[in-house]
Amino acid sequence: MRILVIDDEPLVGVMLSNYLSNKGHNIVSVSSPKDALSAMNPAIFDVIITDYKMVPTNGIEAAKKIRATGYDGRIILMSACCDSTNSELAAAGIDVFLEKPFNLDKVSSLIEDLCGVKKKVEPEYAECVGF
């Protein structure tokens, strides 16, 4: 999958990018919503993961601007603290709120679930059940 990571904390961007790249995803990481909107077309991504607390544009405002471009993929908002309600998140077009700190394996599973990706069946198991 093609995933865009937007986070003004370089360490988080690098950590997510490295982990998801190792899982076989194509990752682009930027440090601000402005960079994301000016440098590329959000529509090329299957999933956008954005931090909430960024200046001058927070993750909710970023999601609104991304949705305004016609983007119909999945948006995940991540934060250690978010003072918005579920209805505000939904109105901004955010599919899932991910609380920091998070487990990277859960992020990977969440992305697969959101995008309807079926897990690969291990070859030995496939032979046992007659696939």
Image (spheres, rainbow, N blue to C red):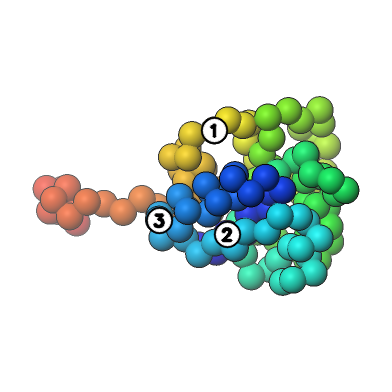
Amino acid, disc 2: Ile
User: Could you tell me residue 124's position as x and y percent?
Assistant: 13, 50
Q: Residues within 10 Å of mark 3 (few under 14, many from 20)?
A: few
Work out which residue is located at the far right of the displayed protein and give it.
56
Q: Is residue 75 above or below residue 35?
A: above
User: Could you tell me residue 116's position as x and y percent?
Assistant: 49, 53
Looking at the image, residue 33 sits to the left or right of residue 128; the answer is right
Real-space CA distance between mark 2 and mark 1, rounded to the nearest whole angstrom: 18 Å
Amino acid, disc 3: Asn
N-terminal-most mark, 2 or 1: 2
Residue assigned mark 2 = 3
Among the 4 quarters of the image, the one containing residue 96? top right
Q: Residues within 10 Å of mark 1 (few under 14, many from 20)?
A: few
Q: Residue at x 57, y 59 (%)?
A: 3
Q: Secondary structure at mark 1?
A: loop
Residue 22: assigned label: 3
Tally of numbered discs: 3
Q: Is residue 75 visible?
A: no
Residue assigned mark 1 = 102
